[in-house]
């Protein structure tokens, strides 16, 4: 299952740009899979965008050999996990112990689902590091055969691509606006939730899926401890020091 080259976007920037950002360009369909892919990198994180049929799981793996044992992957599916490791061809991937991908957007338009997820450039144990630099990234993609449950995708529903990462001036400007944004991770979480720019947080209130107030945890070392909560879906009301409130959905495993 070696890859066949589908796309290389060249015209790399020859200059050295400190803190630069890079993008694979406009989302594109990979072969006949019906899945489009876009990857963007910033100084501290990578952002992945996958689009495909809303009734099918959507997966992306690192490397040029599909489902190679030990290969890193992201899979949107009916389970709560998103961060996976492949175990070889024909073997169901395993969810990583640490879920380093955080889904920031999951929208459906017509019959198409678009999932946006972020993680640090280095990721965690078993994750493939991604450079914030010009170059190429080998990936393979697959989608479910009309199911969100992990299962055999069918030969026509998987293919390979080489992403060309080029300097993106618009992305660089956008990243400036993200520098002070409060972000939580991992999500799903086993209990400990971390926050980027936690110094901007005034308070946090946790509600269950019915809207009932549960607890107002205290921040300690940029993290909160929700280990006592039962597995399920919760909503966090995060109030910043300037009084602005935001709401984040959290899945507790």
Image (tube, helix red, strand yellow):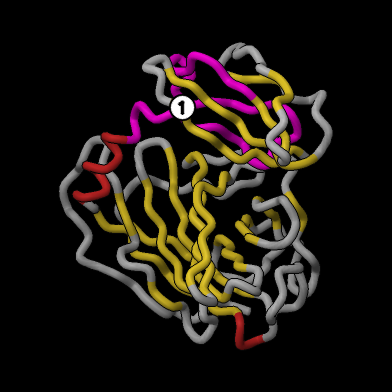
Indicate left or right for 92 with 114 as reference: right
Residue 125 appearing in the image: no
Indicate left or right for 154 with 180 as reference: right
Above or below for 246 versus 88: above
Question: How far across and how far down the image is residue 40, in percent?
Answer: 37, 53
Above or below for 163 versus 237: below
Q: In this picture, which residue range is highlighted in magenta?
A: 178-205
| Magenta span contains residue 11 | no
Residue at figure coordinates x 16%, y 48% from the top left: 15
Residue at figure coordinates x 65%, y 46% from the top left: 126
Write down the quadrant of residue 159 in the picture: bottom right
Mark 1 = which residue?
Answer: 245
Q: Is 207 or 24 nearer to us in this picture?
A: 207
Residue at figure coordinates x 64%, y 58% from the top left: 71
Q: Is 174 or 251 nearer to us in this picture?
A: 251
Q: Is 127 or 188 nearer to us in this picture?
A: 188
Question: How far across and how far down the image is residue 121, in percent?
Answer: 47, 42
């Amino acid at each position: 299952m070696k890859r066949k080259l589908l796309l290389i976007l060249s015209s790399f920037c020859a200059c050295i740009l400190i803190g630069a950002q890079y993008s694979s360009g406009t989302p594109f369909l990979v072969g006949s899979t019906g899945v489009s892919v876009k990857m963007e990198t910033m100084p501290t994180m990578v952002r992945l965008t996958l689009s495909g049929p809303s009734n099918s799981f959507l997966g992306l793996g690192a490397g040029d050999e599909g489902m190679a044992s030990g290969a890193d992957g992201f899979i949107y599916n009916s389970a709560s996990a998103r961060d996976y490791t492949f175990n070889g061809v024909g073997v169901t991937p395993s969810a990583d112990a640490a879920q380093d991908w955080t889904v920031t957007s999951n929208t459906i338009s017509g019959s198409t689902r678009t999932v946006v997820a972020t993680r640090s450039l280095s990721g965690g144990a078993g994750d493939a590091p991604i450079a914030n630099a010009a170059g190429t990234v080998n990936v393979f993609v697959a989608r479910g055969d009309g199911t969100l449950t992990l299962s055999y995708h069918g030969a026509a529903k998987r293919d390979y691509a080489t992403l060309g990462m080029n300097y993106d001036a618009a992305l660089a400007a956008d990243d400036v606006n993200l520098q002070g944004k409060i972000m939580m991770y991992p999500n799903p979480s086993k209990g400990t939730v971390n926050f980027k720019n936690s110094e901007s947080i005034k308070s946090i209130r946790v509600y269950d899926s019915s809207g009932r107030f549960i607890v107002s945890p205290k921040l300690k070392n940029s993290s909160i401890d929700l280990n006592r909560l039962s597995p399920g879906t919760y909503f966090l009301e995060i109030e910043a020091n300037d009084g602005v409130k935001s709401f984040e959905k959290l899945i507790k495993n």
